[in-house]
Amino acid sequence: MQLGFPVSRHTIASIAPNKRRFHVGPVNLAHRKLSDDDIDSSAPIQDRQPWSKGRAVLYASGVGIASASLYYILVNGPSRSAPTSATAPLAPTHFTPVTLTASISCTPYTKLLTFKLPSHLIPDASTRMPIFSVYVKDSDIQVERPYTPLEGIDAQGQMHFWVKRYQGGEVGRWLHERKVGDEIEIRGPIPNWKWQDGEWDEIVMVSGGTGITPFYQLMNGVFSAISEGRLPRTRFTLLHSSPTPLDLPPRSILGPLQLFAQLYPESISIRLYVDAMDPKASRVDLPRLALGRIGRKALERAVAPRSAETDWWWTKLWGPTRRADVARRKILFLVCGPEPMIGAIAGPRVQAAHGAVVGGVLGEMGAEPHQVCKL
């Protein structure tokens, strides 16, 4: 069940014509301010809260090491001089030309881009993991950056990307300047994470901004191919954060995810957070929103027992989720987004490379290193 882009209300509704009626069109704005227990002000995102001097030094050191490593790999590494082939299927070892066939502005700094890969260059499906990316080369300055195709590569060779133009981000800026009909070069697929149904009882995904793209790719792959009565054994929870409602992912991304949550509530749940409301958002159709940052209370709620009846006695007897509860259970946390958010949720990315203990909120909750993956 490939959804394709753009996704209209009629397209979404037609996915389950024989099921009970679901409302998947525009939803009236219904946000609520959370209680103090819902909002964890101790988890800094962006520059909202001052950091301690020690933590700031640690984070700056981590970013410096990561940046230096990234520069060496991308600029001085062998990939920079990888050859270009218009005859061999797409592969990580060489660049392949693709053509921009659609460019849709979502906000002043984000676009949905569609590229077409010639059919004879489509790689074998076995080379594509549930979450994979491709490297896009900025031919002007010969630098590459990884991007996640939202629905992978379809049978026609189409790839859809949600791309943000960051200040100082050369490849994103360069992509935003491409016109329909322009040709660029990519290489991949690059596997990011391998998933097997049942390996984990629960997978909690925490994303910020365009960091939702690998999770959309995973959810689209899992739930669009689902057979009647054959739900995944793993339960998924997505917690996504954006600065304001106008910064939320476009409807072509949120619409299918909301539909999956409506069709299969026992297998997937979604909660959207915004740092602040925007007066202009009153003119935009939005899903239900929670006001505040993704902090410890939000994560504890995500891993708490599901039924309302169980929630009551669990909290009454044990209080909030204890450190040992998370470590003993088969729960995996996937985190993707801006570096400050990753640091606040799971510790600086550089920790993963050195096998250090989990930091941030997940560290406080007792998550073990094998239970956390930073994408």
Image (tube, helix red, strand yellow):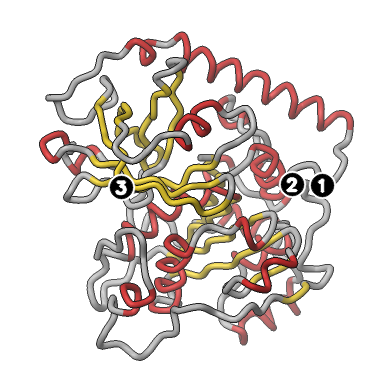
Q: Secondary structure at mark 3?
A: loop
Q: Is residue 202 left or right of residue 355?
A: left
Q: Residues within 10 Å of mark 1 (few under 14, many from 20)?
A: few
Tell me which numbered mark, 1 or 3, is placed earlier along the sequence.
Answer: 1
The residue under the point 36% across, 34% down is 134
Tell me which numbered mark, 2 or 3, is placed earlier along the sequence.
Answer: 2
Residue 257 in which image quadrant = bottom left
Q: Is residue 128 above or below residue 60?
A: below
Q: Residues within 10 Å of mark 2 (few under 14, many from 20)?
A: many
Q: Is residue 52 left or right of residue 368?
A: right
Q: Which residue is mark 3?
A: 152
Residue 52 x/y as whole percent? 88, 35
Seen from the viewer's position, the closer of residues 243 and 319 is: 243
Residue 220 x/y as whole percent? 35, 59
Q: Which label sits on residue 243?
A: none
Q: Are marks 1 and 3 in contact (CB under 8 Å)?
A: no
Kind of residue sitting beneath label 3: Gly
Q: Are marks 2 and 1 in contact (CB under 8 Å)?
A: yes
Q: Which label sits on residue 48?
A: 1
Measure the C-alpha gap from mark 2 to mark 3.
Answer: 29 Å
Residue 283 in which image quadrant = bottom right
Residue 297 x/y as whole percent? 73, 63
Kind of residue sitting beneath label 1: Arg
The residue under the point 61% across, 65% down is 272
